[in-house]
Image (cartoon, helix red, strand yellow):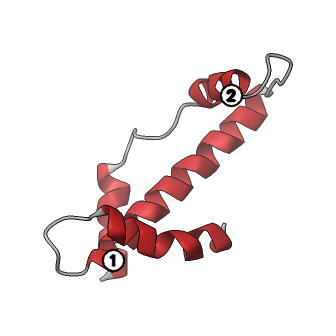
Amino acid sequence: NYFRFFRRVKMEGKGKEFKAELIKKFFENRWSQTTKASKDGAAVAAELITIFVKEAIVRSIRAAGDAEQVLPTHVEKVLPQLLLDF
């Protein structure tokens, strides 16, 4: 059941969010040093990335069905729709 997987990921994922400071450093290192992210902007981006990754995990588990583990092919299968949804 989709909701059972989501609840399990949500419960096991407590405290496993992306930190705003990490996202801020990533933005600064990925683009030029002149690109700055505010504290609030980095916090929002971190929350969005956390939601995106958790949703990718849940959808990949769902696509795996009865398989023992989630394979890259399962992630590849759900990625196009996931990108359209976000």
Q: Is residue 70 left or right of residue 42?
A: left
Give the vertical position of 9 relative to 50 (above or below): below
Element assignment for label 1: helix
**Percent from the top left, x then y, of residue 28?**
72, 22
Q: Are marks 1 and 2 in contact (CB under 8 Å)?
A: no
Residue most extreme to the right: 34
Q: Residue sitting at 53 percent across and 48 percent down?
A: 50
Residue 42 circle label: none
As measured in the structure, the alpha-carbon distance from the residue carrying label 1 to the one carrying label 2 is 32 Å
Element assignment for label 2: helix
Q: Is residue 68 left or right of residue 54?
A: left
Residue assigned mark 1: 62
Label 2 environment density (alpha carbons within 10 Å; few <14, some 14–19, many ≥20)? few
Q: Residue sitting at 39 percent across and 61 percent down?
A: 57
Give the vertical position of 51 relative to 77 (above or below): above
Q: Residue sitting at 17 percent across and 80 percent down?
A: 66
**Percent from the top left, x then y, of residue 20?**
62, 30
Q: Residue sitting at 62 percent across and 67 percent down?
A: 83
Residue 30 circle label: 2
- Specify the amino acid type for callout 1: Arg
- Observer-side mark, 1 or 2, equals 2
The one nearer the camera, 64 or 8, is 64
Q: Is residue 58 left or right of residue 79?
A: left
Query: Can I make out residue 45 in this image?
Result: yes
Query: Can I make out residue 6 in this image?
Result: no
**Percent from the top left, x then y, of residue 2?**
36, 79
Dot 1 or dot 2, earlier in sequence: 2
Q: Check the picture and name the quadrant holding the C terminus.
A: bottom right
**Percent from the top left, x then y, of residue 49?**
58, 48
Q: Check the picture and name the quadrant holding the N terminus.
A: bottom left
